[in-house]
Image (tube, grey):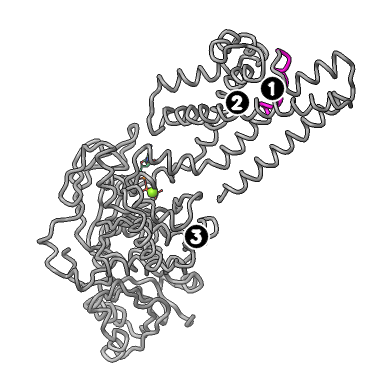
Amino acid sequence: MNNPFPTIGAHAPLQRDLAATPPVVRLRHVRRSFDGVVALDDISLSVQPGEILGIIGRSGAGKSTLIRTINGLERIDAGQVEFDGQDITGLHETALQPVRRRIGMIFQHFNLLSAKTVAENIGLPLKIAGEARAARNARVAELLELTGLRDKANAYPSQLSGGQKQRVGIARALAAKPLLLLSDEATSALDPETTHSILELLREINRRLGLTIVLITHEMEVIRAIADRVVVLDHGRIVEEGSVFDVFATPRSETTKSLLRSLRPSLPAHIAEHLDVAGGAEIVLRIDVSGDAARRPLLAEAATELGLLPRLLHGGIDHVGDQPIGTLFVAVPAPGPGDRARILRHFNDKVSGLEVLGYVTDPV
Amino acid sequence: MSPILFNLLLRSIGETVIMTLASGLISLLIGLPLGIILIATDRGGLFQNRPVNLALGGLVNAFRSVPFIILLVALIPLTRLIVGTSIGTMAAIVPLSIAAIPYYARMAAVSLREVDRGLIEAARSIGASRWTIIREVIVPESLPGLTAGFTVTLVTLIGASAMAGAVGAGGLGDLAIRYGYQRFETGVMVAVVAVLIVLVCGMQWVGDHITRRVDHR
Ligand SMILES: Nc1ncnc2c1ncn2[C@@H]1O[C@H](COP(=O)(O)OP(=O)(O)OP(=O)(O)O)[C@@H](O)[C@H]1O
Ligand SMILES: [Mg+2]
């Protein structure tokens, strides 16, 4: 992992030299198409032990197909899939079964067996693996504890809330002590609060068990909250890849920029409507900051150095892992003729993005 | 109704119940596996196999399209082969089962096919074999449908067993025709119809009850 910023997902016991450890998953030039529709187009990537890798992309970009190739639920047309050093590319269904027992998977719609109780659902992977009942029960009890479902052991899935169902899904995925957890939109059917608690649980599992996680989501918030690294897919290709901080702070591809739009603040409409392109008493700027720039007293510096008092209209500083990143909408008085140039010069040196949005005459 | 007739009625009820339950059980034991094979060999199934699917589907349809009364007569040689005679309660079980097996196989297949693909996918993701998926996922998940379908099969069998009575199978149908119809014993006719209604309602009630018990969806 070449992430210089120790984010929340990467925890102390795993901060050994990750470059030296072999990857949990390695895809090489993977291709897959469905009746002429290319779903995966020359995908190469590796997943390092203990990391949380996020996969984002628009609907139909190939995210689910990609994650499903990792545990062999989806066959590939060309390329190679390696799991824990083993080439699993050509394996047929029966040979894949022991591999899949070492890879947990959770789903958007939970996919719990309605005819089995919570405990039976969680114990199923162990039953399939042929574990004795006593050992199974002990492990199920551990997992019920871990996922906070102790009092639901004998309930049926239909008696649970969405968040509880996903906890059962997670417990089931962890039952056989997998090396890797795959998550396909696991929080997409949940409300924000429940999403938060599920993410907390995943992060805790990642930290405590050192479990490697690959997760798909269309919610950028999810990536920001728990992922270490992110891969952006578009039309079956990887268009961007890097640490979450780098990608979020300086997105390069158009796809990434548009996906991140939901996360980046924009000027509220009632202010934007009052902007004047020609000129006015105050100049309105959009300032993007990340890393060190975001740690500085940016507005105070402007006030002292320029002698002009900037007003914060909208926006603020957010965090990716422990790194600050943000967008500020600022109005700066520009009374004199040279002021505009002076203001721009001042900010240009310190921030990663600067845009003049217009002017306002009457403060709004 | 005379005590003799009353005893006859009791015996007939017993015969009808035996015919229905025995052929019902046989249709369950053979029809359910057939239903499983039907969906497993279908396109996208766990053991996809077109030839087997088409052959079995055709066979099931062929048997289902033969009217029961014709099956009853056509199967007399087979019945004689299996039971030793073609007359009586035991003999009627053969054609009843053969009619009910494809009937239940189809109904079972409908329920089995309805199992959410996501569940099968989840089972695959935890390393389940195809047989395990059938045993742990497909059958348990469609249990409510399988039970409801079995109830319908039993109720249909009660009616069919009455028809089998016409060829000497005994049971309530036999009683109704010989006494109620041919000897104008209206009391017997009424009693038989009343008993049939109670039997059907009772079976349906028990079936519904079990279906609800196994349904955790
Ligand atoms: N089983 C399939 N049969 C045919 N086409 C498929 C199949 N699975 C996926 N595809 C196609 O492959 C492409 C990628 O699909 P995929 O499900 O991987 O997208 P996704 O990124 O997960 O989208 P979403 O965000 O909507 O879940 C799409 O064009 C889809 O229509
Ligand atoms: Mg998807």
Instruction: Find out whether the residues at labels 1 and 2 contact each other: C-beta distance under 8 Å.
Output: yes
Question: Is the residue B207 above or below the residue A243 in the image?
Answer: above
Q: Secondary structure at mark 2?
A: helix
Question: Is the residue A243 above or below the residue A288 in the image?
Answer: above
Q: Residues within 10 Å of mark 3 (few under 14, many from 20)?
A: few
Amino acid type at circle 2 is Ser
Q: Which residues are magenta?
A: B156-167
Q: CA distance from mark 1 to mark 2?
A: 10 Å
At 34% from the left edge and 75% from the top edge, which residue is drawn? A318
Total of numbered circles in the picture?
Answer: 3
Amino acid type at circle 3 is Asn
Magenta stretch encompasses residue B164? yes
- Mark 2 and ligand 1: say if the CB distance to the nearest ligand atom is below 8 Å: no
Per the image, the residue denoted by label 2 is: B23
Per the image, the residue denoted by label 1 is: B161
At 31% from the left edge and 48% from the top edge, which residue is drawn? A130
Per the image, the residue denoted by label 3 is: A154
Magenta span: predominant SS is helix
Q: CA distance from mark 3 to mark 2?
A: 37 Å
Which quadrant of the structure image shows residue B128?
top left
Return the chain for callout 2. Answer: B
Is residue B70 in view?
yes
